[in-house]
Amino acid sequence: MRFVLSAIKHETNTFSPIPTPLASFAIGRPDGVPMAGHDAVKALRGTNTPLSAFIDLAEKEGAEIVLPVAAEAAPSGLVSDEAFDKMADDVCEAVRKDCDAVFLDLHGAMVTESYDDGEGELLHRIRKVAPDLPIAVALDFHTNMSPAMAANATVIAGYLTYPHVDTYECGMRCGRTLLQALKGQVKPKIVWDKRPMLTHTLRQLTSVQPLKDILDRAIAAEAGGNVLNASVFGGFPLADIPHVGFSAVIVADDHTSAAEQLSNELLDMAWDRRADFEFDTEPLADSIARAKTLDERPIVLVDHGDNVFSGGTQDVMDTVAEAVGHGLSDMAIGPIWDPKSVTEMIEAGVGAEVTLQLGGKTDMPAIGLKGKPLKVHGTVHRITDGRYKVTCPMDTGMILNHGRSAVLDTGQAEILVCSERMEAYDLGVFRHAGIEPTAKRYLLIKSRHHFRAGFEPIAKHIVYLAGSGVTSSDYSHFQFTKIPRPIYPLDRDMRL
């Protein structure tokens, strides 16, 4: 057999000013082209990713592996048409050369310059080449599910955890069902629906309510054999597209009545507790003042308004300024995205004293926010290549790369500054730069929940900071024009 395996992953924040060209899917590669072929197989084998699971399944079946593209970009603004067409064309060309099945590791919330539903368009293009080809699709928990995805896939399965620590398992769940179909053991049918809910990401932690028992019900149904696959998608709310919402996708074996019943049960559970999916923010100054009263270390300060893995610019400095202004000390901060400041520190050299206009290089016109640098003075403490291997449960084994980086020691804080955007979710983000996170009193990072994969085990306290930026949890900052209305909580009094 010949299997085409591919990954094309991007979570698009339509309010983000950061462009997403092809090079964004190939950070660290001098040719600016994403991984493919044997290089991709070698790099991804043994990692906690759906594509790694697909590789293992294909090799176990003795199938020839064709891997035309393995691409993932940090969440940002619209994917360029040039980038999307190149990656989609590579996949379609591999399919055109004949294959027995396709296994896709996608995100589910990609928006391009021309398409609100990037994944649906990709699947549509594959179907035009091979109308009857079996296609398995692994999707992120933050998928904005669309009719085109459901209509053009054979099997769909999604992550059941946030932080996403079950990504390899998701690939296995999805891939095994497709292999069963290839062998004539099952006849997959996709049943799906959604509810008009723009849930807050900070209320999508899957280990606690309101989501935990919803996910537990889906997991039990799949494990018990009632259905082939059961997935729940919290959705990605910072996309102004028609497909946002809270959805459930059930893959049934031929008969769909049990799947429809399960889908409605899961979605009704979510709708009935829709108010629990709202996150109430606290004034930034109050959060910092509260953090100052806490004793045990480390105290993790989480800036969720400028989180790169939701499309943030990673250079908004208001939380840093507030922490410094309140006199917090013994801090590790970062990474802050500022290639210009990195260059200045590298040119100055380790041990040199420098004064920087740090961060604040990016304007955010979609929310009317101007970039505002923070003046800092300190000593260049360390320079790194920004690369480290993930050891936490999320993306385990992957090599992360936030580009040439440098540490500035201001006395109050060691600030890690990077030249490529990357969220702090593995302790290696600090350790690779010589900063031991367990020794610091405060760790100020930009994240939402992914930080929990690496930082929660060491945290004595976690304090969320409502900083400014395009990943704010305050929906009043965003002008939605394309999302379906009415939708909760923007239309609070709506009824189904």
Image: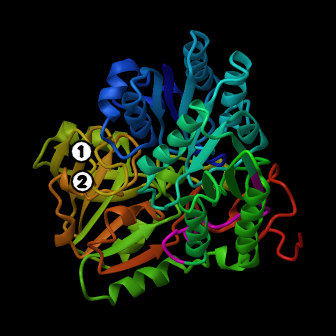
Query: Which residue position holds label 2?
Result: 428
Residue count near mark 1 (Cα–Cα under 10 Å), binned few <14, some 14–19, many ≥20 = many
- Whether tag 1 and tag 2 are in contact, CB under 8 A, the answer is yes
As shown in the figure, which amino acid type bears the numbered disc 2?
Answer: Gly
- Is residue 412 among the parts visible in the rendering? yes
Q: Examine the image and state in which quarter residue 12 appears.
A: top right
Q: Is residue 201 magenta?
A: yes
Residue located 57% across and 9% down the image: 97
Residue located 36% across and 26% down the image: 40
Query: From which residue to which does the magenta span run?
Result: 192-208
On screen, residue 24 versus residue 281, left or right, reads: left
Badge 1 or badge 2: first in the primary sequence = 1
Query: Which residue position holds label 1?
Result: 388
Q: Residue furthest left?
A: 351
Q: Secondary structure at mark 2?
A: helix
Residue count near mark 2 (Cα–Cα under 10 Å), binned few <14, some 14–19, many ≥20 = many
The answer to whether residue 256 is above or below residue 401 is below
On screen, residue 120 versus residue 415, left or right, reads: right
- Is residue 476 among the parts visible in the rendering? no
Q: Which one is in front, 398 or 379? A: 398
Q: Examine the image and state in which quarter residue 129 appears.
A: top right
| Residue 91 in the image, given as x and y percentages of width and height | 56, 20
| Residue 15 in the image, given as x and y percentages of width and height | 65, 49
Quarter of the image containing the C terminus? bottom right
The answer to whether residue 82 is above or below residue 195 is above
